[in-house]
């Protein structure tokens, strides 16, 4: 899971930078990019990256709980 989440985060950042550069280029050329496209694009990645962050937080909580159970069994 660790490799997959790193891949997703890296891919997301690359796509966000690529989209931003493309939009800036279109604007520089005098073309219009619909606001709804930009909102949807960034919202999709916000949800994706939030989901990955939530999974990582949940994994850490589970690991901490397992560690606490281990020490409680010893004591």
Image (cartoon, rainbow, N blue to C red):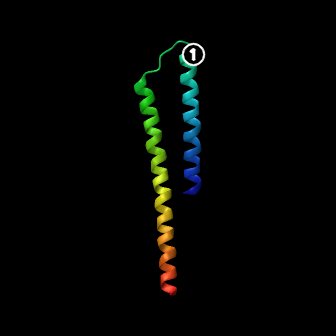
* Residue positioned 47% across, 40% down in the render: 45
Is 18 left, or right, of 61 in this rendering?
right
Front-lying residue, 40 or 7: 40
> In the image as oriented, which residue stretches furthest toward the front?
75
Q: Quadrant of the N terminus?
A: bottom right
Q: Disc count in the image? A: 1
> What x and y, as percent, mark residue 53?
49, 52
Are there few (<14), some (14-19), or many (20+) residues within 10 Å of tag 1?
Answer: few
* Residue positioned 58% across, 30% down in the render: 18
Residue 15 falls in which quadrant of the image? Answer: top right
As displayed, is residue 74 above or below residue 67?
Answer: below
Is 47 left, or right, of 14 in this rendering?
left
As displayed, is residue 2 above or below residue 31?
Answer: below
* Residue positioned 46% across, 44% down in the render: 48
> In the image as oriented, which residue stretches furthest toward the top?
30
SS at circle 1: helix
> What x and y, as percent, mark residue 43?
43, 37
Is 29 left, or right, of 42 in this rendering?
right
As displayed, is residue 58 above or below residue 49?
Answer: below
* Residue positioned 51% across, 68% down in the render: 63
Front-lying residue, 67 or 22: 67
Q: Which residue is mark 1?
A: 28
> In the image as oriented, which residue stretches furthest toward the left?
36
> What x and y, as percent, mark residue 27?
53, 17
> What x and y, as percent, mark residue 32?
47, 16
């Amino acid at each position: 899971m660790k490799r997959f989440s790193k891949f997703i985060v890296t891919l997301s950042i690359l796509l966000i930078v690529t989209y931003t550069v493309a939009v800036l280029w279109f604007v520089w050329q005098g073309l219009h990019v619909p606001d709804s496209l930009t909102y949807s694009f960034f919202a999709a990645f916000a949800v994706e990256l939030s989901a990955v962050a939530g999974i990582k937080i949940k994994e850490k909580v589970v690991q901490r709980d397992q560690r606490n159970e281990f020490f409680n069994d010893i004591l």
